[in-house]
Image (spheres, coloured by chain):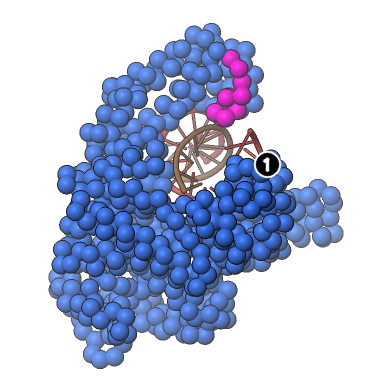
Chain colours: A blue, B brown, C red
Amino acid sequence: MSAQEGRLAPVHIVVGAASEGVVLRPESGESETVCRADFARRVRVLDAENVRWVWDDTTTWYPGLLEAGVRIGRCVDLRLSHAILRNSALTAGSELARAAVGPWDRPRREHREPDGALFALDDEDGGKVDADPVAEWALQQDAIATSADAGRIQRLLAAESAGALIAAEMRFAGMPWRADVHEELLADLLGPRPKPGERPARIEAALGETRRLLDVPDLNPDSPAELLKGLARGGVLATSTRSWELKKITHPAIPSLLEYKKLARLASANGWNWVDTWVEGGRFRPDYVVGGVVTGRWATSGGGALQLPKQIRGAAVADAGWKLVVADAAQLEPRILAAMAGDRDMVAAGAAGDLYAGIVASGAIDTREHAKVALLGAMYGATQGDGGRLMPQLARAYPKAISMVEDAARAGERGEIVSTRLGRSSPLPGTTWRELQDDAYGEDANPAAADRARSYARSWGRFTRNFIVQGTAAEWALCWMASLRNRLTELSGDLWFTEAPHLVFFLHDELVVHTPEAFADRVADEVRAAAADAGRLLFGALPVEFPLTVATVDNYGQAK
DNA sequence: GTACTGGGCCAC
DNA sequence: AAACGTGGCCCAGTAC
């Protein structure tokens, strides 16, 4: 990696596809064209200088480089950057934002399995013909330069692009996953692997018990409508088959039915079929979709990586002689809320470690549980239950923090956009919003139309209310990971990154590093230092703490 | 056969 | 405790 980093400005090299191979265009100096076979070698050599690679799409270029054994330091992902600049309130006046929708506004290409070609550069639909990366890069630089706050948007774009590299690297490295351990867990919970078309023994037993106790021998538990009818025949009058509703009903058959639902869910979502499909060569490799959620959170596709149930996390086992360092940002979103609002009282409440306990200690709310639901309610827009009821108390104690989310909600209700700390902006409401508002105030206005309009506007307000917090938390997490990536690279010396401590998993406010045992303590230190870096990147000198729980474990199930 | 929707539930 | 944000995935049921 670049030894000059921080002292010399990086040289940008724009990467583009050409019929003869790949064109590398430095900001100044001669362009060069290399054949595809030489591309990876050339990138390796040039990246040793202080280079920032500018390319249309990291998912197009980087997996091939990694396969060829080449890792890079930094990049500009033009597609991801374009999406941010297109919508950001900070660049709304730019030529880029005002231009017609074009090839740079398309979603990323579908992931394709390697088909022998090292780099899949050809676009079947020919959409890349007018997508000149040099011209786009110039437009983006102009948008940044003329931005209302170039520093913020620059930090956001850097973090997003770093995220793109990390996503590709995590997929390449994979989360260690022991199929044999997973199957042992399944056997313990469900019974031995069943023959195709049969239910696992424990599930069959729970169903048999339910049928017997209900006295409905042909109860079909897998169709909600059928189940509801079956329950009625057995004398259980339920309005839905949701577990939390069934829990409220007292009937001897309910416990075994809940057991059935729990186990059947595990078997269908993360059972033997999941292992067969998603675990290969001792690794689980989800496809991370950077910026895949409107708020800037990552999405994933394949294997449900964002919803791995706690029951099977024990199958993520570090390699022999290695450890998993699992780090989790405690109460991230409420802390983000306090920091971005500049609410020093709420920041102070979190300083001692437990923000909810700090709120109770301040006298604002009576119990920790109430503090928690009130604060979550403030971020989600609760109107009922404890959350809704306690919110006014919270607003009196922390007016800055609460008015910030209230303002975001009102803006959304009016159909305006809102923005995160670094300048990612929410989309405008869709046509439904406009139509309903028109209906409510137009010639055919009536109370029902007004209700519909108000209800839809409120719902959009809950979205914008949550957007600023969830989106800023996503920015914090990106900065955290990006800083950690640099720090781990420093630790690794000349080792290839998968032979040294490296990121293998990320989940909104939690990350996992796979590391040789000897490095584990240093990794834990770097994870904490990176969290402090992220706090400074977003909030400067504001003395806000982002405490982590860090666990060094043999398997993911041992963490928290 | 494929495409889509709603119910349900997992994660944060 | 249960209605208040963001998602993905599985399944059953339905439309074509």
Q: Is residue A49 above or below residue A212?
A: below
Using residue A323 as the reference point, say whether residue A227 is left or right of it: right
Quadrant the N terminus of chain A occupies: bottom left
Q: Name the one closer to the observer, A450 or A363.
A: A363
Using residue A384 as the reference point, say whether residue A483 is left or right of it: left
User: Residue A445, how many percent across, how many down?
Assistant: 84, 55
User: Residue A242, how many percent across, how many down?
Assistant: 56, 30
Could you tell me if residue A20 is visible in this image?
Answer: no
Dot 1 falls on a residue whose secondary structure is: helix
**Residue A136 sits in quarter:** bottom left
Q: Name the one closer to the observer, A423 or A439.
A: A423
Using residue A43 as the reference point, say whether residue A201 is left or right of it: right
Q: Is residue A379 magenta?
A: no
Q: Is residue A244 magenta?
A: yes
Q: How many numbered marks does the figure carry?
A: 1
The residue beneath circle 1 is A386
**Residue A412 sits in quarter:** bottom right
What segment carries the magenta color? A241-251
Residue at 72%, 56% (x, y): give it: A396
Residue at 36%, 64% (x, y): give it: A529
User: Residue B4, how many percent across, how many down?
Assistant: 52, 45
Quadrant the C terminus of chain A occupies: top left
Q: Main secondary structure of the magenta part?
A: loop
Query: Looking at the picture, which amino acid does disc 1 mark?
Result: Asp
Could you tell me if residue A27 is visible in this image?
Answer: yes
Question: Quick one: label 1, few (<14), some, or many (20+) residues within 10 Å?
Answer: some
